[in-house]
Image: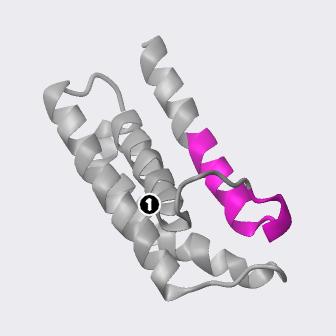
């Protein structure tokens, strides 16, 4: 039960972090040694995995929302003067989300859901 709650918190915190990084001015965006493409894909993979595991009884809703949400979150960059929305970036995010959904499905299949 505690683990289920922690996974839900982690899912929502990952979404908040992605939203912040996506729409914040480019100057305060965190940087690391990985390619930006890998950062995007891994962030959405992790978020999707967390949501699918956190809400196993709502698999389809989570799957659709995180994949379509990748495009929606990319579109939010139109509201930031230092950022730009690109179809290629949205595609990378959607692919990452799709991988996360698949990994979440596999995790839920291995460990049958106990809560919603």
As drawn, is 71 to the left or to the right of 27? left
The spot of residue 34 in percent (x, y) is 53, 55
Q: Which residue in the rendered view is the most extreme toward the top?
A: 2
Observer-nearest residue: 64 or 88?
88
Please name the predominant secondary structure of the magenta segment in the image. helix
**Occupied quadrant, residue 74:** bottom right
Drawn side of residue 56 relative to residue 76, left or right: left
Looking at the image, is 28 positioned above or below residue 75? Answer: above
Report helix, strand or loop for mark 1.
helix
- Residue at the image position 40 percent from the left and 69 percent from the top: 94
Which one is nearer the viewer's eye here, 95 or 55? 95
Residue located 37% across and 44% down the image: 49
Q: In the rendered structure, does residue 28 fall within the stretch colored magenta? A: yes
Identify residue for label 1.
41
Residue at 59%, 70% in the rendered image:
73
At 51% from the left and 62% from the top, the residue drawn is 40
Percent x, y of residue 52: 35, 43
Q: Nearer the viewer, residue 17 or 40?
A: 40
Above/below status of 68 relative to 16 = below
Segment colored magenta = 12-29
């Amino acid at each position: 039960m505690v683990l289920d709650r922690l996974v839900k918190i982690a899912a929502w915190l990952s979404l908040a972090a992605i939203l912040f990084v996506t729409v914040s001015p480019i100057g305060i965006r965190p940087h690391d040694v990985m390619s930006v493409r890998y950062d995007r894909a891994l962030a959405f993979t992790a978020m999707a995995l967390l949501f699918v595991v956190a809400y196993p009884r709502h698999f389809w809703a989570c799957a659709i929302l995180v994949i379509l949400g990748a495009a929606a979150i990319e579109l939010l960059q139109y509201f930031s003067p230092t950022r730009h929305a690109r179809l290629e970036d949205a595609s990378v995010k959607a692919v990452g989300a799709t991988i996360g959904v698949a990994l979440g499905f596999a995790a839920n299949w291995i460990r049958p859901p106990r809560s919603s």
